[in-house]
Amino acid sequence: MNNILITGGAGFIGSTLANFYSKDHKVTVIDDLSMGSVSNLDTSANIQFIEGSVTDYRLMEEVLTDTQFDYIFHLAAIASVADSVARPLETHQINFDSVFQLLELVKCNQAELKRLVFASSAAVYGDEPTLPKQEESVIRPLTPYAIDKFAAEKYVVDYFHLYDIPTSAVRFFNVYGPKQNPESPYSGVISIMMDRYKKLLNKENTTFTMFGDGTQSRDFVFIDDVVQALNLIATSSETLGEVYNIGTGEAIELSELVSIVDDFLGVSLPIRYDNERPGDIKHSLADISKVKGIGYQPNYTVKTGLEKYVSYEL
Ligand code: UD2
């Protein structure tokens, strides 16, 4: 039985990962509940929940001196690109400072650690138009979010090379699935869309706002595939000090996404078109050869993932 720490563990990705590991391992979750919820976590004696922020040095020091962890997943972040443009200083403290602080605490207190996995983002590639994005592609971060993720990712990898701390970083493309919170205007687009479909099916008045003309495309990856990839990366020795894209290798336009769910549910989602969001990337697509090299195989296309999501949510 391993000891696993998941920061942001009550959020969408973190709670799915915590529930997955809690079947066989002891999981400690730290979350400030800004986007996450304790109700995302299974009721399990193997999960210990701590409410607090990863920016709280005292709290993090206490947790990391109390317990020797085998694995740490640092997922706590302000996940929204648009929110980082609106609040660059606040998001920097969470998306960058917390990582640096965690690395130092791990260096001093976690001699038994097998792996620290840091959640970076496809946003680091920015708007350089060459697709698909390989890990070695040009990096052109455009927003505070992307700059923080890239700088933090660099430190994470550097701590392996300089201090032998066992680290890996992952660049998430657009992750979706059950438990993604649709409440904020900055939530993942599929969770917002699902919320509007739910209202539509309940005969409530609703509109989905499309920022731009709907021709922007994303590599949407289903949460179960993300958990598969994270587990492989954390437990493989060849991933030490390396960075991995996590996506599907297929992209879809937003308007196409709406058509798929419309057809599936036999409805027509009312759409209001608005201006593109500042800092928005037009197209995003992962090259996943590197993570496939350690045995990753996405089990869901966007169609099958959406079907599963729709049957779970609606
Ligand atoms: C996602 C991640 C971000 C980062 C990035 C990597 C989320 C919430 N954000 O940012 O953390 O990893 O990918 O590239 O998962 N949109 C609408 N209507 C809405 C909401 C969004 O049209 O109500 C559009 C939005 O303008 C964008 C697209 O949908 O063109 C995707 O937006 P998003 O916020 O889901 O994700 P993204 O790609 O900005």
Image: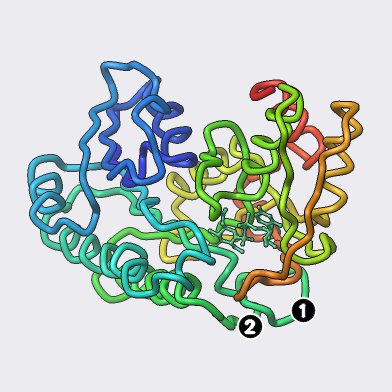
Q: Quadrant of residue 190?
A: top right
Tag 1 residue: 130
Q: Nearer the viewer, residue 192 or 18?
A: 192
Amino acid identity at mark 2: Val
Q: Nearer the viewer, residue 88 or 74?
A: 88
Q: Quadrant of the N terminus?
A: top left
Rendering coords of residue 186 (x, y %) = 54, 55
Q: Nearer the viewer, residue 271 or 36?
A: 271
Compared across the picture, whether 41 is left or right of 195 comes to left
* Residue 156 makes an appearance in the image: yes
* Residue drawn at point x = 56 percent, y = 41 percent: 182
Rendering coords of residue 125 (x, y %) = 61, 75
Classify mark 1: helix, strand or loop.
loop
* Residue drawn at point x = 8 percent, y = 47 percent: 62
Question: How many residues crowd around disc 2 within 10 Å: few (fewer than 14), some, or many (20 or more)?
Answer: some
Up-down: is 70 above or below 118? above
Tag 2 residue: 138
Q: Quadrant of the C terminus?
A: top right
Q: Quadrant of ligand 1?
A: bottom right
* Real-space CA distance between mark 1 and mark 2, rounded to the nearest whole angstrom: 9 Å
Rendering coords of residue 84 (x, y %) = 45, 69
Q: Are marks 1 and 2 in contact (CB under 8 Å)?
A: yes
Counting labels gives: 2
Up-down: is 158 above or below 78? below
The residue most toward the front is 205
Classify mark 2: helix, strand or loop.
loop
Amino acid identity at mark 1: Thr
Rendering coords of residue 72 (x, y %) = 31, 47
Compared across the picture, whether 234 is left or right of 25 comes to right
Q: Quadrant of residue 212?
A: bottom right
* Residue drawn at point x = 44 percent, y = 53 percent: 237
